[in-house]
Image (cartoon, rainbow, N blue to C red):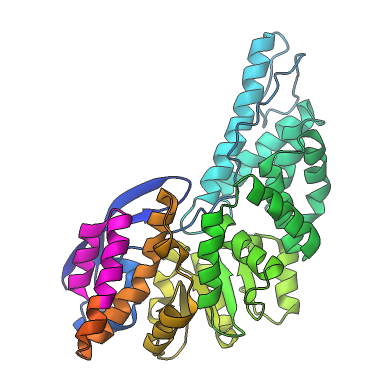
Amino acid sequence: MRVLLILLFVLSFGCLFSQVETIFKDSEDEKEEKLKSDGRSIVTDSIYIEMDNTAAPVENNGVDAKKKLLKTKSTSKPEIDGNKSLEGASQLYHSTSSKFKSSKKQSSYQRTQRSPSEMQQKEMNNAVGYFEENSPNSFEYHYFKYVSGNYDVSRYHHLKDAEKLRENNSDVHVQIAGYHIIKNNKDQAVRYLNKLISDNRLSDNIIKYAEDILLSAPKNGTLITHGFDDSYATWYLQSQKKIRTDVALISLDFMQSEYYRDQLKKKGYNLPNSKNIDVSYFGQFCKLNASRKLSASLTMPKEYFRPVLLNVYVVGLVFEYHPDRFENFKANEYLWNFRLKKHLINNVYDETSKHLSSNYLPMLLQMRKVYGQTGDTDKVKEMDRVVDKIGAQCKKYDQVQKLKSSY
């Protein structure tokens, strides 16, 4: 067995960061070469970028200090002593709100599951209990009550009450848009997605990138997305712009909703016998629905692909799932030459676009590998020019050169 030390970076829109990871490669050199030949080893030894996975609150919503002392009864919730000062009550109000937001953010940024952990759910529920008892007419109570339900559509009236209190709050708009996507209320979903676009919460960069995600999906197939950016942007393009309407969209994030899962069952999808949406759930879902021409956005954390590594093949900006051997070179070549728009390669105008453009590297490196094997030096040079351009603009040129040499 040999140990391969690999420098890789993983970027998300919420925060950009790099990490050094040690990957223990399989002892069989043949298996390693097999994975490289079709791009699957990009999961473990390459550079690609994950999108923002969260719809957690990002704004400072300016919680108003309470004008009177509030008193709780339950010892399981944050308490306010009736003898404390108004300042103390206000601090507890703010700290409880902050704890909820922190738990939700931690839940949303988990790399191995979409569902909150038991502790995260408990902390959110405790915060909701505090506001329910102390400030039941507040924005915080209604908004947190809905969000803590993890897309429980029966709580929608709380979300509408929150909107009445803060009609221009983009966090609320995110959740309302998600509700209407889950319920397949297209007109209302588009209305709120347009609000998010106007506020730049759903940015032009994401929408342009999402177009190539959709174009990468197989004909009449199923595209699995992960979080806020890829789920909302692909849905918007398909519903509003009528791009790739043949593709069925499934959001892992929305699969937390019992209503959403029930609708998938009615459409003929087989679902794992679990309510915890995690890496294992994703792997089981793929195996249970292998005949549905599945693909998954490269914006998903790489942890999701490791359990199904031998069955996923890079095609454009997605990994296609295939139970049997799949030759993806021709598909990548066709996409690159005739289908993909490549907005974030050819029209780079901000740092987000530059970093996200690195998601084109898996397909390009796989194509370069095949061209090298067939002795097509002109094509190798063509791929090198693009790969080097992407590496330079995303400020990972040296890492890209190491990857090229390994391919």
Q: Residue at x 26, y 70 (%)?
A: 385
- Seen in the picture, residue 359 relative to 152 is either above or below; the reply is below
Labels in figure, total: 0
Q: Quadrant of residue 128?
A: top right
135 or 129, nearer to the observer: 135
Q: Quadrant of residue 165?
A: top right
Please tell me whether residue 122 belongs to the stretch shown in magenta.
no
User: Would residue 15 be visible to someone looking at this image?
Assistant: yes
Residue 151 shows in the view: no
The residue drawn where x is 76% and y is 14% is 67
Image x and y of residue 124, in percent: 64, 40
Q: Please state if 13 lies on the left or on the right of 285 as rendered.
A: left
**Quadrant of the snapshot with the N terminus:** bottom left
Residues 202 and 377: in front is 377
Task: Name the side, left or right, on which 62 lies relative to 313.
Answer: right
Q: Position of residue 308 (x, y in %)?
A: 43, 76
Vertical arrangement, residue 206 with respect to residue 272, above or below: above
Residue 254 in the image, given as x and y percentages of width and height: 65, 61
Indicate left or right for 243 with 379 as reference.
right
Q: Is the magenta region chiefly helix, strand or loop?
A: helix
**Can residue 391 be found in the magenta stretch?**
yes
Stretch in magenta = 382-407
- Who's the residue at 58% across and 88% down the image? 291
Nearer-the-camera pick, 40 or 193: 193
Which quadrant: the C terminus?
bottom left
Residue 317: percent from left, percent from top? 45, 71
